Amino acid sequence: MDINESRQERVGRSILVLLAGLALTAAGLWAGRQLHIVWNIWPCTDGVVVRAAVEEIVVTPYAKGGLPVHHFIPKVEFRYTVDGKFYSTEAPSVYTADTYQAAAASVARLYAPGTHHPLRYNPRHPGEIEFGTIAFSSLAFAFLLLVAGVALAVAGSRMLIVEFAPRAQMAPAKEGAIPAAVLPFAQRAPAGPSTATLHCPACGALVPVTEDICPQCFKSLRAA
């Protein structure tokens, strides 16, 4: 019972990892597709700067006790024409500065009132625009989502394969007495009753009791 429950838990964890990987992969693909649509499919038009300002963005770290981070982003209002209709839209720049002075200098240098800039607009909603260059942070975020999603999806798939792959059943070892092997010996003495011997009184050699004369010294073994 415990084995089945632990296996069910492993299968459930594998499915969660796989689903998380698929979700991150889908999010990365969606983010990358949106960037592709904006910077490769949206049509372009000429925009004239009406006014520009600097917007402060405060980012609070998730870590406890972390200090807030301040970023400054130029926000520019453009006037442009789409299909003979005039639009006036304010949009943030992809440029981000760590100080207000740097952002203000960028506004004064690049987005002075009356200057012209190419704009990309959503053909379904012309009031939605993008300008400048593609944001590296957005591209990197989409790439990281895609890589993390693929990695988790592969890990979850491998975990499921390991759980459902057929495993070799090992037969239990049988306990029993192993008969002792009798090794043959070339000079093994034949089984049988041993022959009684005696010492020759003359030379001391061992002689079977059935002999009358010692085969070594040829003396008589019988007393006269």
Image: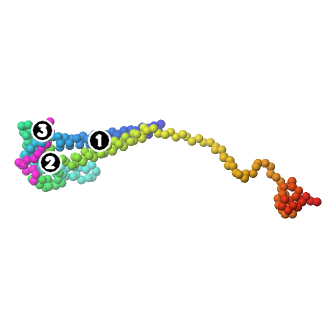
Q: Quadrant of the C terminus?
A: bottom right
Q: 53 and 142: which one is in front?
A: 142
Distance from label 2 to label 1 (Cα)? Answer: 28 Å
Q: Earlier in the sequence, mark 2 or mark 1?
A: 1
Q: Which residue is mark 3?
A: 126
Q: Which residue is mark 2?
A: 132
Residue at image point 10% right, 42% down: 45
Q: Residue furthest bottom?
A: 203
Residue at image point 24% right, 40% down: 30
Q: Earlier in the sequence, mark 1 or mark 3?
A: 1
Q: 143 and 202: which one is in front?
A: 202
| Image-based side of 114 in relation to 200, left or right | left
Disc 1 is placed on an element classified as: helix
Residue at image point 8% right, 37% down: 83
Q: Does any portion of residue 56 appear in the rendered image?
A: no
- 126 within the magenta span: yes
Q: Residue furthest right?
A: 224
Q: Which mark is residue 25?
A: 1
Q: Earlier in the sequence, mark 2 or mark 3?
A: 3
* Disc 1 and disc 3 in contact, CB within 8 angstroms: no
Which residues fall within the magenta stretch? 109-127
| Image-based side of 86 in relation to 137, left or right | left
Q: Is residue 94 above or below residue 16?
A: below
Residue at image point 5% right, 48% down: 114
Q: How is the image coloured?
A: rainbow
- 205 within the magenta span: no
Q: Tell me where residue 46 appears, x and y as whole percent.
A: 9, 44
